[in-house]
Image (cartoon, helix red, strand yellow):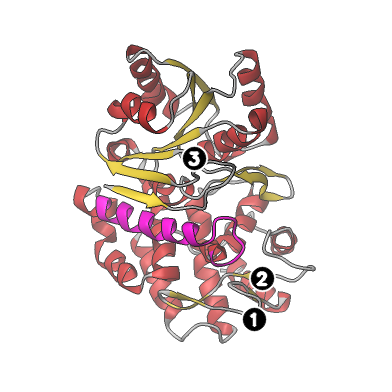
Amino acid sequence: MTVRVPLPARGGGNASYDILIDRGLLARLPLLLAEHCPAAVYVVVSDSHVGPRYGEPVVAGLREAGQAAELFTFPAGESSKTRETWAALSDRLLDSRVGRDGALLALGGGVVGDVAGFVAATYLRGIPWVQVPTSLLAMIDASIGGKTGVDVPQGKNLLGAFHQPRLVVTDLDTLSTLPQRQLASGMAEAIKHGVIADAEYFTVLERDCQAALAREPGTLERIVARSVAIKSEVVAADEREAGRRATLNFGHTIGHAIETTSGYDLLHGEAVAIGMALESQLAERAGIAEAGMTGRVTRLLSQCSLPQELPDSAAVDAMLTAMRHDKKSRHGELRLALPSRIGRMAVGADGWTVPVAESLMRSILTAASSL
């Protein structure tokens, strides 16, 4: 199937792009790239886990089709999502004399997409790129929307750029080799999509999450398709996060603070799962969400084997400091995207985020850290 992300034209070109979802798409990459992103050379950026498994065959396939291609890899994991990795990849492109007629392929999970996209956004002031996600989380969330960037000591994703891909190629066959923990981590973003936009989808996840974790093909395809549709619709309505796109940050204010203060010991989806559990509780206690919502969210998280308690390394004061650096904060005020009920987000006086008293946030975090 194909999901179109319609975006306004700019710079004399069309910014809209397609998300292709099917099996066996990696084998079709030479033809797909020739159609959607023709280039003099393709640089496949991947990590140390995905590169040997999928990157080498992709490069070989491109070369067999007569297309110049190289593979650049960096160590897998969030700890590589840094300015140093961005600089090293940029230097390799310069050393290889890749010009503006070249293109990047981000082949891997969310970290690969964020870093490779940031390189594409900044190299020679921007070159074309294509997302080829291989994890569930990247397929349904990170690969869509053009957000790119790296982490810094002060927080997650604080340096970056919006740079839309020319194409997203989602080959569902790559999920067969995804570690079980990574698969569960991706389900956190699917749950988020249900909470923020589609109560019926949330109910489907309550019914089907075990089948998804068992890798039942039809179930995974339906989850990927629905989540991609939700994310694409939100991004198309608000490309630069000036309004509704902020709703995609449900669970992420606390989730990012957990990642920053714990040294990224948890996977992104695991941190977001804890964030959704605690932010749901916060929304109920603040009178923003209807009673009982937190129970449904936490039960589904449990069904998906996702954590809900703060790790021992997450210190409350350090988390609050990280939250003050959050991109949604204004004048030192904590602002969060919070649901009013399953399938609907709260709308504040200033838009899609609402202010939260630091005392209430501290109370929620302190209680969670003492469990």
Q: Quadrant of residue 210?
A: bottom left
Q: Work out whether residue 352 or residue 2 is closer to the camera in this orientation and state it.
A: 2
Magenta region = 220-244
The mark nearer the N terminus, 3 or 1, is 3
- Is any part of residue 188 visible from this angle? no
The 10 Å Cα crowd at callout 3, few under 14, some 14 to 19, many 20 or more, is: many
Q: CA distance from mark 3 to mark 1?
A: 33 Å
Q: Amino acid at mark 1?
A: Ala
Q: Nearer the viewer, mark 2 or mark 3?
A: 3
Q: Locate residue 218, reporting x and y percent.
A: 20, 51
- How many numbered markers are drawn? 3
Magenta stretch, overall SS: helix
Amino acid type, residue under disc 2 in the picture: Arg
Q: Nearer the viewer, residue 79 or 111?
A: 111
Q: Quadrant of the C terminus?
A: bottom right
| Residue where numbered disc 3 is placed | 165
Describe the element under mark 1 as helix, strand or loop: loop
Q: Is 68 within the magenta?
A: no
Give the label on residue 335, or none: 2
Q: Residue at x 49, y 26 (%)?
A: 48
317 or 156: nearer the viewer: 156
Q: Name which residue lies at 73% across and 45% down.
A: 153
Vertical order, 32 against 315 (above or below): above
Q: Is residue 321 above or below residue 285?
A: above
Residue 110's disc is: none
- N-term mark: 2 or 3: 3
On residue 349, which mark appears? 1
Estimate the x, y position of residue 148 in percent, counting from the top left: 58, 43
